[in-house]
Image (cartoon, rainbow, N blue to C red):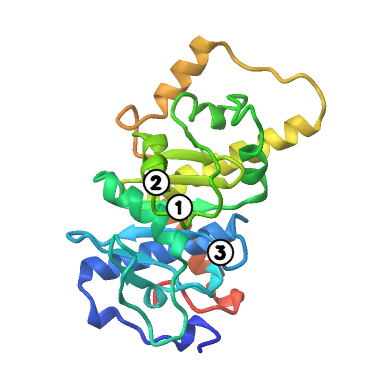
């Protein structure tokens, strides 16, 4: 069993250019989620679909997010069957395709799904009030956020129908008593959404810890602000930031002790 992702054979020449590009983007997203403190040891998942197919890329169950590379990802179908993976005893976590596969199958507009168990995300997921529209960042999600009640660990295939229904057409959802989930038409946009949702949760936890009365804008302002964050109103969030995020990863790669994400 490999100890690090450097032990995995590079598959660049074994897959299509489209699949390799998807692998690189997804591996970068794993590294960024780690970089910004949204990981939970080896748990959780980020999936990306391979253009022109019904196949998904997902992490091996046993690697840290900071270890993941383009070549260490597994390829699965929507039912969770492994189509290809590195030569290792590591497999995949069932909850990865129970949650992610359901969304990819139901939403043709979604190419990437991100699920986290961050400290702030779990805290807000456990609050009866849910996410409050108290900062400009969190107002982005006003009336554009789904909620799914906790049914236990996500291993029940029957839960998929309810989860998809609760997500609806949103690109973000709070899994009550569990964590956060975002999706999008690209890896870049899904990452931007999880970053903003996470920052919203952290701000809410910090503000509520202050023990003072919270100030919320008027409903008119909330609706206007939320509208400006929706697709088509300005620009696709995440696309402009992505090259800078890639530069950040590459600048820090040598000092991390882990292999580059794009190998």
Q: Point out the residue furthest to the left here.
A: 52
Q: CA distance from mark 3 to mark 2?
A: 18 Å
Q: Secondary structure at mark 2?
A: strand
Seen in the picture, residue 64 relative to 222 is either above or below; the reply is below
Which label's residue is closer to the chain start, 1 or 3? 3
Q: Nearer the viewer, mark 3 or mark 2?
A: 3
Which residue is located at x 53 percent, y 38 percent? 149
x and y, in percent, of residue 217 in the image: 59, 15
Q: Which residue is mark 2?
A: 183
Assess disc 1: are there few (<14), some (14-19) or many (≥20) residues with their C-alpha within 10 Å of its C-alpha: many
Between 69 and 257, the one lying in front of the other is: 69
Q: Point out the residue furthest to the right here.
A: 211
Contact (Cβ within 8 Å) of mark 1 with mark 3: no
Which residue is located at x 19 percent, y 61 percent? 53
Q: Which residue is mark 1?
A: 114
Which label's residue is closer to the chain start, 3 or 2? 3
Q: Which residue is mark 3?
A: 43
Contact (Cβ within 8 Å) of mark 2 with mark 1: yes
Q: CA distance from mark 2 to mark 1?
A: 6 Å
Occupied quadrant, residue 94: bottom left
Between 155 and 17, the one lying in front of the other is: 155
Q: Nearer the viewer, mark 1 or mark 3?
A: 3
Q: CA distance from mark 1 to mark 3?
A: 12 Å
x and y, in percent, of residue 119 in the image: 67, 49
Which label's residue is closer to the chain start, 2 or 1? 1
Q: Secondary structure at mark 3?
A: loop
Which residue is located at x 29 percent, y 30 percent? 232
Which residue is located at x 47 percent, y 56 percent? 245
């Amino acid at each position: 069993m490999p100890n690090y992702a450097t032990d995995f054979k590079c598959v660049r020449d074994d897959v299509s250019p489209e699949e390799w590009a998807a692998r690189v983007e997804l591996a970068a997203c794993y590294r960024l989620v780690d970089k910004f403190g949204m990981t939970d040891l080896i748990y959780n998942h980020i999936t990306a679909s391979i253009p022109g197919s019904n196949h998904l890329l997902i992490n091996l169950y046993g690697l840290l997010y900071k270890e993941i590379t383009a070549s260490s990802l597994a390829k699965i179908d929507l039912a969770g069957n492994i189509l290809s993976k590195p030569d290792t005893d590591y497999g995949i976590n069932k909850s990865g395709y129970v949650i992610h596969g359901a969304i990819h199958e139901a939403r043709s507009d979604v190419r990437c799904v991100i699920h986290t168990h961050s400290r702030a995300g779990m805290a807000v997921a456990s609050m009866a009030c849910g996410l409050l529209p108290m900062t400009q960042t969190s107002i982005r999600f006003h009336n554009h956020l789904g909620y799914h009640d906790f049914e236990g660990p996500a291993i029940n295939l029957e839960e998929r129908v309810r989860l998809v229904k609760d997500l609806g057409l949103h690109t973000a959802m709070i899994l009550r008593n569990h964590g956060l989930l975002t999706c999008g038409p690209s890896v870049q946009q899904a990452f931007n959404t999880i970053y903003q949702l996470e920052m919203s949760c952290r701000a809410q936890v910090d503000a509520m810890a202050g023990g003072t009365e919270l100030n919320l804008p008027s409903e008119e302002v909330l609706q206007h602000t939320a509208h400006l964050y929706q697709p088509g109103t300005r620009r696709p969030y995440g696309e402009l930031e992505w090259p800078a995020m890639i530069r950040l990863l590459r600048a820090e790669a040598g000092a991390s002790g882990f292999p580059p994400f794009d190998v």
